[in-house]
Structure formats: structure tokens, C-alpha cells
Image (spheres, rainbow, N blue to C red):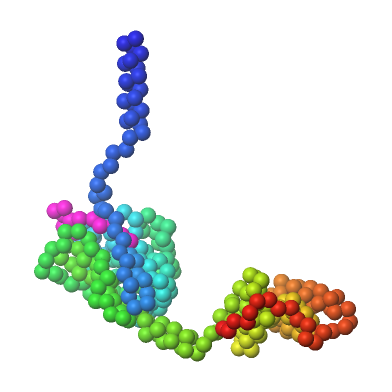
């Protein structure tokens, strides 16, 4: 009996050890900062090592060697819109932030390889989105833990700041906010675009709402900027509303445009629709005034 009790106690103890997890603080805790600048969302993800009595630049972080700009996984920076850095265009997206520290100058790199834990191996310079050089600045204070910050925020610009030990490195980002705002103003004040009319028409057709209104919108879309997929939608609606001659004409236009733009699927679909409409007509053509309608006729 004593042996049985001992065995049970031992099993419980060993099992608890096997399934238990001991949590300890991360030596370089992760940090994510998010900041809106103008109309752009900026996000930086990095791990924050501390000095812990060590000399950093020129020792722990050697001069002249590429650095992941933090600990653990490489530091990531993302922009929700296109930006400009060092007079170079950088597309919206996420990038690894690599640096090459120097005594007086640093090289800063935004790299497209996000798969590597630290530095890519092999390193492909052709995957760099931008590379530029900035001066480093000595500070009168010592910062114990690595800090990457988004500062000097204006509507159009901000600075990315890398601060550690007694060194500050910062670079400007131009967010082109004025152009984004002006584009929005122009779009709204000039009214709906051809694509707005097309999407509204597509939705009404797919949901079985007012087909007369849907046809009005897609015709407006094609008047503004005819495209084969928009013409095909117009032909479909004209067919459903028994405007057969118009449906054939629209499908023919869609077919010609699809052929020029090498869209064989729409060529085939246009041919099929034309054949179906002609079969419905039976040689009689449209019957004036007889169209199918549904619902009210809302305004765009």
C-alpha cells in the first residue's frame, strides 16, 4: 500500500513538472509602436535590449557591420501609404530596418526580406527598398534601453529616431499628406467616379435590387470610362430588362474591347450572351415599353 501511494505521488510530481511552464522576463522585451502621421499609419515592431553596464557602439554593436537594429528578430517598420525617404519613393508595406553604425555616420536600410530572424543569409542588396546615410549625434544623457521613436510629427513629415547609449540617429519621412488630401478633395467634389458607378450597379444586380437604376449607373460608368467588364455588365442588365437590341450592341462592344486587351474569358462570355439574347428575340427584336423593373429608383 505504501509503495502504491509513493508511486502515485511520484507520478503527480513528475507529471506536474512535465506539463508546467516557468515564465521568466525576456532579456530584450518586444515593443510595438503605432502612430498616425497625416493620413498614414506607421507601425514599428522591435526588441529592446538594455546596456546593463556594457559599452554599446563600437563594442557590443560593432562599427561598420550591419545590425538588425535591435535584438532577436529584425526590427520591422510599416507604412500604410507610399512615402518618400531620402528623396526616394518607398511603397506602402512592411520592411526590415537594418543599419550599419559608424563613428560619425550611419547607413540606414529598408529591406524587403521579412523572413529572416536576424540578417538575411545570403544578403541580397537588390531587395533593398532604400539605402541612405545620416549623421549620428552625441547626447548629453545616457539612455539605458534601446528606443525607436516617431517624433517631430507634422501633417506631412515625421522623424524616425533611434536612441541608445548616448547616440541619436534620426531620419525624415515625407508622407505626401497634402497630395493625399487633395486627391480626396478632387474625388469627392468632382462626384462619383466611373468605378463608383460600376460598383453600385454591380451590387444592385447581384442583390436583385432595382435593375433599372443599376442599368442607369453602369451606363453612366461606361460614358465616363468604358471598359469591357463594365460593358458586359451593361449588356447583362439590358438583357434582363428585355432591351435586347441594346444588349447585343453592348456585348459586341465588350467583345471587341476584350479582344484588344487579350481577355479571352470576356470574349467567350460576350459571344455566349449574344447567342442567348438572339435566341430570346426569335427574330422579333425589342418590344417597346416592356421592361422588367424592381423596387424604387434611388438617386446616386
Instruction: Tell me where residue 145 sits by quadrant.
Output: bottom left
- Is residue 24 rendered magenta in the image? no
Q: Residue at x 16, y 59 (%)?
A: 144
Name the foreground residue: 184 vs 26.
184
Residue 107 location (% of width, % of height): 29, 70
Q: Residue at x 58, y 84 (%)?
A: 299
Q: Residue at x 27, y 70 (%)?
A: 150
Q: What residue occupies the far right of the structure in this picture? A: 283
Report whether 289 appears left or right of 86.
right
Report whether 53 appears left or right of 154.
left
Residue 42 location (% of width, % of height): 35, 70
Residue 200 location (% of width, % of height): 59, 77
Name the foreground residue: 252 vs 210.
210
Name the foreground residue: 162 vs 3.
3
The quadrant in which the N terminus is found is top left
Secondary structure character of the magenta stretch overall:
loop
Instruction: Tell me where residue 84 sits by quadrant.
Output: bottom left
Q: What residue occupies the far front of the structure in this picture? A: 296
Q: Is residue 192 above or below residue 37?
A: below
Query: In this view of the protein, can residue 121 be seen by the observer?
Result: no
Q: How many marks?
A: 0
Instruction: Tell me where residue 179 sits by quadrant.
Output: bottom left
What residue span does the magenta drawing correspond to? Answer: 45-56
Q: What residue occupies the far left of the structure in this picture? A: 140
Query: In this view of the protein, can residue 45 be seen by the observer?
Result: yes
Q: Is residue 296 above or below residue 145?
A: below
The quadrant in which the C terminus is found is bottom right
- Is residue 47 rendered magenta in the image? yes
Q: Residue at x 47, y 89 (%)?
A: 189
Q: Is residue 34 above or below residue 248?
A: above
Amino acid at each position: 500500500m505504501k509503495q502504491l501511494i509513493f508511486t502515485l505521488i511520484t507520478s503527480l510530481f513528475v507529471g506536474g513538472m512535465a506539463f508546467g511552464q516557468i515564465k521568466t522576463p525576456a532579456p530584450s522585451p518586444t515593443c510595438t509602436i503605432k502612430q498616425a502621421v497625416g493620413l498614414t499609419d506607421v507601425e514599428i515592431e522591435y526588441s529592446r535590449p538594455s546596456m546593463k553596464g556594457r559599452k554599446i557602439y563600437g563594442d557590443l554593436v560593432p562599427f561598420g557591420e550591419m545590425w538588425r537594429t535591435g535584438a532577436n528578430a529584425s526590427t520591422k517598420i510599416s507604412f500604410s501609404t507610399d512615402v518618400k525617404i531620402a528623396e526616394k519613393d518607398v511603397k506602402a508595406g512592411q520592411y526590415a530596418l537594418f543599419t550599419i553604425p559608424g563613428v560619425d555616420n550611419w547607413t540606414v536600410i529598408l529591406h524587403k526580406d521579412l523572413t529572416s530572424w536576424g540578417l538575411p543569409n545570403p544578403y541580397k542588396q537588390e531587395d533593398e527598398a532604400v539605402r541612405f546615410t545620416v549623421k549620428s549625434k552625441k547626447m548629453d544623457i545616457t539612455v539605458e534601453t534601446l528606443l525607436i521613436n516617431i517624433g517631430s510629427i507634422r501633417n506631412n513629415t515625421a522623424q524616425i529616431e533611434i536612441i541608445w547609449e548616448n547616440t541619436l540617429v534620426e531620419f525624415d519621412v515625407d508622407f505626401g499628406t497634402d497630395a493625399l488630401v487633395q486627391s480626396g478633395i478632387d474625388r469627392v467634389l468632382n462626384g462619383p467616379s466611373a468605378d463608383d458607378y460600376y460598383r453600385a450597379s454591380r451590387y444592385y444586380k447581384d442583390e436583385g435590387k432595382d435593375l433599372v437604376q443599376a442599368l442607369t449607373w453602369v451606363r453612366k460608368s461606361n460614358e465616363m470610362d468604358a471598359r469591357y467588364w463594365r460593358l458586359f455588365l451593361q449588356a447583362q442588365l439590358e438583357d434582363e430588362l428585355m432591351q435586347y437590341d441594346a444588349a447585343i450592341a453592348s456585348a459586341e462592344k465588350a467583345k471587341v474591347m476584350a479582344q484588344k486587351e487579350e481577355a479571352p474569358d470576356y470574349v467567350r462570355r460576350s459571344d455566349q450572351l449574344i447567342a442567348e439574347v438572339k435566341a430570346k428575340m426569335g427574330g422579333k427584336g425589342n418590344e417597346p415599353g416592356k421592361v422588367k423593373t424592381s423596387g424604387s429608383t434611388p438617386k446616386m
